[in-house]
Image: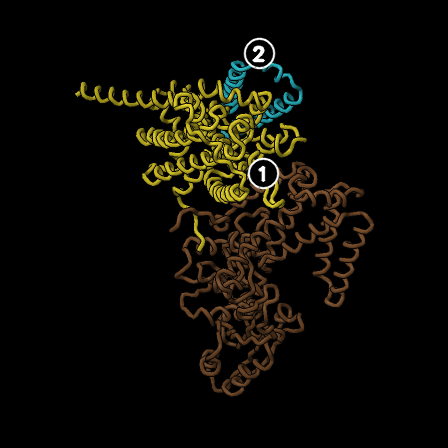
Chain colours: A cyan, B yellow, C brown
Amino acid sequence: MKRTYFFILILVMVSALDILCLFHNEQWNFLVMYSQRKKLVAACLLILVATVYSIVLDWKDGRNSHTKGSE
Amino acid sequence: MIRKMDGYSPLQIFIVIFLFLEGTAILINLAPDLGRDAWIATLFCTFIGMFLIWWFFFLLRNTNQRHIYAVLQQGLGKIGGSIVGVVYITYFIYICARDMRDFSELITNAVLPSIPLEWTTLCFTVTVIYVLRCGVQNFVNLFVLFGYVFAAIFVVFLVLVIADGELDFHNLLPIMGDGIGPMLPSTFTQVLEFPFGELIAFTAFAGMLYPNLSGKVMRASLLSVLAAGMVLTVTIIVELVTFGPSIRERAMFPLVSASRNISIGNFIERIEMIVIFAILLAAIVKVCIFAYAALQGVVWYTGKSYNSLIIPYVLLTAEISYYVSNNMSDHIMVGLSFVPIYIHIPLQFAVPAILLVFIKMRSRWRKRDDQTAV
Amino acid sequence: MTKPLYETWDELEETFELTFGKTTDFVKVPVLFNGRKCWILYYSSLVGSSELSSLLMLPFNLHAAKSENVEQFRATALASLNYMYINDWIVIARQLNKNSVCILAEGEQEALTVEIGGYAERSISEPVIQPSIYGPKIAFTESIVTNISILRRVLRTKSLQMESFDTSSDMVTGTVLVYLEDVIEPDLLNEAKRRIQSLEGKKVTTSTHLMKELRDDKKTNFFPTLMVTERQDACIAQLMEGRAVVFIDGSPSGIILPAVFQDFFRSSEDAYLPRPMMIFLRVLRYCAFFIALLLPGIYIGVINYNYEIIPINLAIEIAGLRSNLPFPSVIELLLVEAAFEIMREGSIRMPKIVGNALTVVGALVIGDAAVQAGIVSIVVIIVVAFTGLSSYAFPYYNFAFSVRLLRFIFIGVASMLGIYGVFLGCIILFAYLVSQRSYGYPYLQLNAKRS
């Protein structure tokens, strides 16, 4: 599951950096942006697809390493 | 005679660095508050930029490593190197998202106002994913093709601007009328970081393409930074000369506005589409290079294959590009005030400098240990 | 230990009818060879009667009575013919099917086959698909022997090598690989040989099938990676550059491998033109490529999203023409494109007599009538006609197919994203082209290294 964990780590860190930049500039106004529905739906869809893709690939890797018996 | 490809040539890195620097710098307003003297600042930073690329490659050559993540591990140890490496991956992805946002804003403002930003960004993302999937050998060749097209379009643009005749060189006078002093803070906090400081992205993979970073490659890179800086300077001069510093200060996309102005014989009217195509080529190069730099880091830290990692991270970049800011003016504000000072300077200059010091100290400790052991 | 051809002559006579004699063009002539029973076997459709009588029958009448065995007869009377001694019926059948006559004498354990040949062949004629204006008007024919001779009469060097492969087991279609030994890269040669050899037993009979098997990427690719030529000078130029040509029996064309993108824009006529003219024509062909690919897409993008690009007067004209139309512009374009494609397909198959009428009817019906009825606007007709004409500008006919297909993808993308979509589509197309390989050579030759 290395791939997915790393992805989530990077996701959290980049979002943190993003919010940090916005916070410095606009203070809490960035929450307004996060509540815009169209953007939120599109963003959630993208993250969902990316995460599911990572999970599926990790699962395939896990299955392959079991059948192959090696790492 | 047809040839196979064996190894990368210096011309390829020349073109890639050139397009990378043009990237979004040719698109947005560089140093708006410098007014008339923006071109001097750019020219000055070109030379500093040449030193920068030499320094970044020196870092790689000196430590005999392939890319910066390995250098970090060598300098700061495995844990420290990993932490700073992850910070760099984050940084690359964030800058990649900012560049994507820059370009998508251009498209939404100038080309396709009726189509939502999310959709144009998504199509751009699909293109970037496809280009990255082709593999580094292929996309470097692709960028060489882009380079030729970009050069051709730029030359045509210059010719048309001069033929148009509406150039007022008095807009440039007085040169450095306020003296050097007021120019300095802006130069060092804005123009140097963007675009020249972003060359740090090349440390993430240049060592893998050119194992020795030999003299020829070095020379090609320096020439490339010089050429790109010259082109940027000429672009800024053209913009200033076409509409003057006060209008340029307020323009969001000065090059596009300048090409809108060109009108020759009532026939060649709106050439901005061609200019936007050239900017698209350079923007794709920049986004792909940053994404590739980040992906190399992820490959290094997770050990998974490159092809399987492209889609999640590029989609992540697209998502972040939605949330980088609310609208274009906020985007520019954040990009000019917070990002350069707290993010670009530490990561582009401070960390490599500290790294170099650490590595030198470590090698000296090791030498001292060897001597005491003996 | 192989089985002997026959146990006794009488048993052979009984079983022979069952194995060979069914078809009416198989001829079995029982003769006397110095007192022994002897059969002469051949297919009458493959062996010409005048060749048979002059090359075999006449010497047979003169010398057969004096010879001790078949070998002596062959050495004295049939010395000028290619021969083989075979003791396996399958191989005999194969040789008979080529153009040989088999002499089977009682008491001999091996049969003698001599190549006589002489069936009716097409003589060397002018190239049809790639007509020649200044160059030699020699096109390849269906027989491999003639094709090799067409090449050897110009390339009179011993480094012109050919290697034969039998690419099917019972159907005996031959494939020949031709190359210049001192110019070709060894890797390319080995790879080509390996691929053809892997086809043995796969019943490859047509050149299209062979091309499909010899390709790099077995999935569908949009752009051809092998070139087909029927002209002598084109083939010779490619051979001298270090490529290999594959001929297959029964197909009047040579398959040149490898082939890259730039090759499809070169015509063999270019060598006979002065250099500035050649450069001009080549630039023109590249422009035609982009026009045929992108013009409908750009038209859709400009009309739907960015009409401010075209000069103001033209924009007003087009808007005026389009004001009363029933269909949206994409549907209109697709209708006219569909009609044009159908007309194009039809005009290929029509016999020459009706062909003219078809073009006139097509132009009238599709063009004028549709415009006057107010179904489509005349601008679309112009766009589609210009696109169609551009796609004929390629020297290599098959290349136009890929462009025709991709055009529709660009129309679809342009209808969603306008000009921006066309730009992105171009980038994806070039990324695709750059990553294609033809026998390991990059399809778009952009190698920045100069050797």
Three-letter amino acid code at the position of disc 1: Glu
Q: Mark 2 points at which residue?
A: A28
Q: How many marks?
A: 2
Q: Mark 1 lies on which chain?
A: B
In the displayed structure, A48 sits above or below B130; it is above
Residue B274 in the image: state x and y as whole percent. Answer: 57, 41
Residue C275, above or below B279 = below
Badge 1 crowding class, 10 Å Cα cut-off, few under 14, some 14 to 19, many 20 or more, is: many
Indicate the amino acid at tag 2: Trp
Task: Measure the alpha-carbon separation of dots 2 and 1.
Answer: 38 Å
Subunit under mark 2 = A
Identify the residue at horizontal 55%, vertical 79% (top origin): C38
Of residue C86 and residue B288, the one placed in the foreground of this image is B288
The answer to whether residue A42 is seen in the rendering is yes
- Answer yes or no: do the residues labelled 2 and 1 have beta carbons within 8 Å? no
Q: Residue at x 37, y 27 (%)?
A: B70
From the viewer's perspective, is C338 left or right of C205?
right
* Residue where numbered disc 1 is placed: B272
Residue B341 position, x and y percent, is 44, 19
Q: Quadrant of residue C29?
A: bottom right
SS at mark 2? helix
- Quarter occupied by residue C347: bottom right
Q: Residue at point 45% right, 17% down?
A: B342
Q: Say if residue B149 shows up in the picture.
A: no
Residue situated furthest left in the rendering = B374
Residue farthest to the top, as pictured: A28
B225 over C136 or under it: above or below:
above
Q: Is mark 1 on a helix, strand or loop?
A: helix
